[in-house]
Amino acid sequence: MAALVVPADWIRNWEKSGKNEFLQLCRNLAESKPSDDVTLRDIQAALYELAWQVIKGNLKLDQAASVLNDVMEFREDMSSILADVFCILDIETGCLEEKNKREHFTQLVGACLVLVPDTVLKERLDPETLESLGLIKQAQQFNQKIVKIKTKLFYKQQKFNLLREENEGYAKLITELGQDLSGNITSRLVLENIKSLIGCFNLDPNRVLDIILEVYECRSDQDEFFVPLIKSYMCEAQTLCHILGFKFKFYQEPNGETPSSLYHVAAALLQHNLIELGDLYVHLLPMDPSILEEHKREITEAKQIARKLTMVVVPSEKTEEKDKEKEKEEEKNEKPPDNQKLGLLEALLKIGDWQHAQSIMDQMPSFYAASHKSIAVALCQLLHITIEPLYRRAGVPKGAKGALNRPLKSKQAPKPAEAFEDLRKEVFTMLCYLGPHLSHDPVLFAKIVRLGKGFMKEYQNDKQEDKDRMDTLLSCFLSITDQVLLPSLTLMDCNACMSEELWGLFKMFPYQHRYRLYGQWKNETYNSHPLLVKVKAQTVDRAKYIMKRLTKENVKPSGRQIGKLSHSNPTILFDYMLSQIQWYDNLITPVVDSLKYLTSLNYDVLAYCIIEALANPEKEKMKHDDTTISAWLQSLASLCGSVFRKYPIELAGLLQYVTNQLKAGKSFDLLILKEVVQKMAGIEIADEMTQEQLEAMTGGEQLKAEGGYFGQIRNTKKSSQRLKDALLDHELALPLCLLMAQQRNGVVFLEGGEKHLKLVGKLYDQCHDTLVQFGGFLASNLSTEDYIKRVPSVDILCNQFHTPHDAAFFLSRPMYAHQILSKYDELKKTEKGNRQQQKVHKYIAACDLVMAPVHDSVVSLHPPKVWDDISPQFYATFWSLTMYDLAVPHNAYDREVNKLKVQMKAIDENPEMPPNKKKKEKERCTALQDKLQEEEKKQLEHVQRVLQRLKLEKDNWLLAKSTKNETITKFLQLCIFPRCIFSAIDAVYCARFVELVHQQRTPNFCTLLCYDRVFSDIIYTVASCTENEARRYGRFLCCMLDTVTRWHSDRAIYEKECGNYPGFLTILRATGFDGGNKADQLDYENFRHVVHKWHYKLTKASVHCLETGEYTHIRNILIVLTKILLCYPKVLNLGQALERRVHKICLEEKEKRPDLYALAMGYSGQLKSRKPYMVPENEFHHKELPVRNTGPTTVQNGPGSAGKPASTTSTGKPEEGASEENEKSKEKSQSAVKAASKTNNTTPKVTTSNGNGATNSTKLIKEKEDKDKSGKEKNKEKKEKTPAATPEAKAPGKEKQKEERPGKEEKTRETKEKTPKSEKEKFKKDEKASKDDKAKASGGESKSSAEKEREKEPSKERDVAKEAKTKESSKGEKAAVAGSLKSPVPRSESSESEREQKRRKLDTHSSPSHSSTVKDNLNELKDSATKHYTNHSTATLSKSKEREVDKKDMEKSRDRSREREKKERKRDHSNSDREVAQELKRRKDENGTSSSKHSKSESPSNSPQPNEKEKSKSSKSSSKEKSDSAKPEKGSSGGKKESRHDKEKAEKKEKRESTGAKEDKKHHKSSDKHR
């Protein structure tokens, strides 16, 4: 624009160039056509600038006039443009004070009068300017004239002369319009008549139009006639609109009612576009802002009502509120004028004008219009008509007719829907505008639901052709369900039929869609409408009322009320009920019973509400102490189980929720799964089973159901089927199993974190128990095909899914059983033969076929070294069998059958029961009885087949390529320990399996070693268990102890079940002839000693755990002790020691840890009740030593003896020495000492520990005692002077120390101390005699090899010799057993010195996979065995040779004994100072130490060094005794030995009589110090 302004140099050089430049500019502007407005403005600006230059005096007037004259030619309207410029300048110059400029302007206009017409100037210039120009005479008169003209034009109405309008014309007009229109009368004909009437009677056309509208209003059904008439009569829409507006205005008075006919006329005119909605809308009341205010007021009122219902109101406040409410009601009674907008809307809906109706609804707040019943009903009617064709095709149920809805005549009405696709055009939109107010028309509600069902059928059958279109329609239906159907159901008054109808549609949706809809309904829908806010508050209020009164007694009436309330508002009701159940768990039973009146939809909503409550992120799933699961979660879990069992609710959502929680590493919610499986399938997880229940659980399914569970859960067939179907349909069975198996460790290592140890244990147990329970459910309910299809093989489970081995076999076990049975049935069908033997062979063949792949697959589970000792076949057999396969619980079957007989008898004797019911009950009992008997028979046959199979397999089970000890280790580590804590039934199975392997005489299986390892040192196992695992471990120990106790109780039983079994071999000997061809067996009396040692070991471990102060140790050992109470303690002094320790726990834990206190008190009471069954130690086993000639004896009298490890693995560790100190506490000391001293002083019986009584004599005993005495007499004298020598001496119960050494050493020390000095010479003689025997034996040894070569003739003896050699070549393992069981010191300390080994030169069989100490020990025992047997086989040797050998041996043995004595003296001196200090410390501990100090002193790391040295000394001496005692003459010195034995007995008696109690105490102390 700046460029278009006339530049100053143009004006200065106007004549030269300026004029031409200006003309060129105007020409260019006139010719250019970018846009008219822009060009016009540019020309006006140029002319304005030119004129302004003239006014300022810069340009001459004539110059400007001539230029303007030229410019006029460029455009036709240039004069008008110039007039506009003059108009602006007129205003501007009129405002200026400089008169010369005004004059210049007037002159310019005067000069241009020729160019601009006068009329244009008169229009645009002020009258004063016109007067100065001479165009008008007077300005004032001109102004008056203008006012008159304007008034006449715009304000003056034309007045018709009423007298001229004849009334007859209007009368004829009304007659014309009101005539019968049924004939051939058309609007055109009538219009011609109206025109004639207007002309004839001078009628006012507007009045005529008004009368036409009035008649139309009265005859509103004649749309087809009046609408064309008005259309043809009308001149313009505005006139019609004004007339209608005046009509509506007439009714806008208070209490005025607009007639519906007027609404109809307006609607019809709108529909036919004769008037515009916008023009009419402004004439209607109320105004939009007032509608908005009313809507807001309604929302506020609704919220206030809701608040009042939830508030607790004081009575005085109630009266005030009632008064206020009355006032409000009175105000409402004064009716405001009609809402004309809604009336028009209703009329539009009735005639089907949806477009205009939608426009009006859009002007109002959402759902405001539909909240008025008349509008909702009209819209529903329009919907009925629109969906009619489609409903008839796809929605009408079979057999239903229903009333037909005729379509609207109007062509402008929405087109009826013929296909589902048509619903998207207008039906869904209408429904959305209707919202929750569809509740006014339940019939339409049902129709829409049925259309949804019809669509879902098509959708499910759709073959992916129109996937996108169908998905869009599905999302539309879901939206309608969310926004319309569910809110409408809320506003319906307890309409159960609609609820069921809706469920027909909902059940076709996947549960994910359904739960999403329920979530929206519960959490969002109720807040979107004022009406729904009120309904929600009323529902909560009613729910509170019902729940306050709900009890077991009034379940039925309360249930009906709950049912009524739930039909419309289930989400709100259930939400409140669940919140109450979480607080008060005693409501669960009445609530569950009261839910029987619910509809299917309500049950589904209940499932959703339960899941939502479980997943509530605001609630903590642990109690504040962080050690237990919250009560609310337990209550909900219990409710889940009861509700899902009793009512047909879909389980998929709940199961998926638990699965998702497990995926997220959260195991709290397994509680829910546990409850659901327990209630629905009747499978309990109870570690607290009685013995009878446990026995029943080893039978078939029927016996389990009848006698295996606490609650007799009947009728679980349907519910368990539902659970199974839910798992299979949604593929959740295996994922749940795998997730639980993985989560067990996750609980500890991932989820555990900072959680309390007690809680971690509980979660672990819960996870494990649920896995066992769930696995049991799958095994018993899934068909063989389903199970095999879903569970992969063991190697895949373990290697790919990282499932622990125990869980993997637990899942696979039923599969193997199924497969074997099905294969067995196949084989039976192919070859028909009923002989038992044939059946067994077929069964074994079936087993081989099924298990062969399993044997191959298990190899990958462990390193190759494992399979050197146990075969994959044995491993797979152990893990694949169950108690059902091993034994038939005849007692349990008999018990249940007897129960049923008693029931039948009771039914017969019951006079009140009706006959038909009696008959039914008796039939049920008889059927059950038959089933049980059939099942027992079936199981018996099965067990026999399995045992036959095991008998054939057993030779390949244990390979023992390394050592028997390693074999037992692997067996315990990989088989027994993982499985015995898996479940209660598995614990029993493990004990039974060990017994079975023993009974089968399995090669390379040492029963003794196995039992020893189980009972020795259980501390670590117990400490690492959770609470439930401790129960199962206790049950396992109880079963093991039960077997041992049975063998211990009777010699006959022992001889029958163990006497000649390979499991009780202790030593193998190289044999030459039939006198020694049997392997050495443990005899009955020595077995009793071993059992006592095991009992002592258990006592020691128990006391250690109780004294640690650790929660887990104490809890677990108390649980284990409670479980094994029937079998342990059997010995009085051990029982008393335990009782005192437990009593101390009761005192210590009463205030600190109540749960431990409760456990301890419970055990203490039970222990006291078992006291009458306990026996003194000397009755439990003969305390005097039955001496073995093969090495240190098995017997360890009293708890002290067993303190030394006897096992060759875990028990032979240095910590034994430290843990030994535990049991030497005050609590045990006195009772143990009395029992020990009594038995220790008795005379030793001449019994051999290996059963070879003929080869031994009392001389051997004497020789051993003499050896010990002569080697250690001086040491003892020194140690008696020192206050303390060993750590054992420091223990509070010093008297008990003698019990903590092997029995043989005790006796030798005892006799030594009590013997007078005069007897020392006698001992020396004895020593010489023993050396003579030794020399003779060695002579026999040198000859033995030659003898063996000669004896080749008798085949039997040769075979026996070979057998002995092969047994020897198996690296002396069986000899190791004897060593391990009988060695009083750890294996590493009991090995012989190198010199002794060289002297014997019999260490030919070295064990590559074992430690050197084991090797020495084994070889030593083997040597002694070999020597003993060869001594039998050799002929009499020449006496000269014997004497030479005797002399050499005597010299060597003397040298060795002197060297040992020197070493011992040095050690004793160096240790004495340290021992004094330790003794002082021990005394302090005795007086006032706490349990925590005890635990420190007991830890393995605190075992002092001197103790080890003492042990090594004793081991050397004992090994020497072993070698010496193995070489007696065949039967030469029996009489002498007897006489010496008698003498020794007499001397002991004299000593005991002469010395008092003081001497006795000194004896104990000295023996302690010696150790």
Image (cartoon, rainbow, N blue to C red):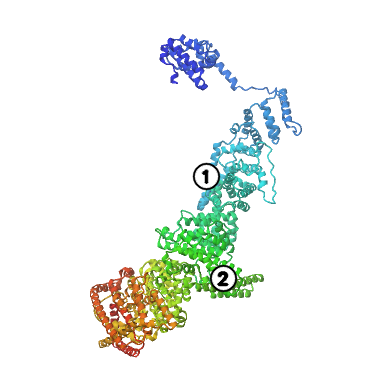
Residue 1385 locus on image (x, y percent)? 33, 75
Furthest residue toward top? 62
Horizontally, is 185 left or right of 1273 in the view? Answer: right
Horizontally, is 1084 left or right of 537 in the view? Answer: left
Q: How many numbered marks does the figure carry? A: 2
Circle 2: residue type: Lys
Quarter-of-image position of residue 1020: bottom left
Residue 119 vertical placement versus 1075 (above, below): above
Q: Secondary structure at mark 2?
A: helix
Mark identifier at residue 35:
none
Check disc 2 and report the residue beneath it. 842
Identified at 53% across, 66% down, the residue is 850
Check disc 1 and report the residue beneath it. 300
Q: Residues within 10 Å of mark 1 (few under 14, many from 20)?
A: few
Residue 323 locus on image (x, y percent)? 54, 47
The answer to the question of whether label 2 and label 1 lie on touching residues, with beta carbons closer than 8 A, is: no
Residue 164 appears in the picture as rendered: yes
Residue 1208 vertical placement versus 24 (above, below): below
Please state, as top left, top right, bottom left or bottom right, where the N terminus lies in the image: top left
Residue 478 locus on image (x, y percent)? 57, 47
Furthest residue toward right? 183
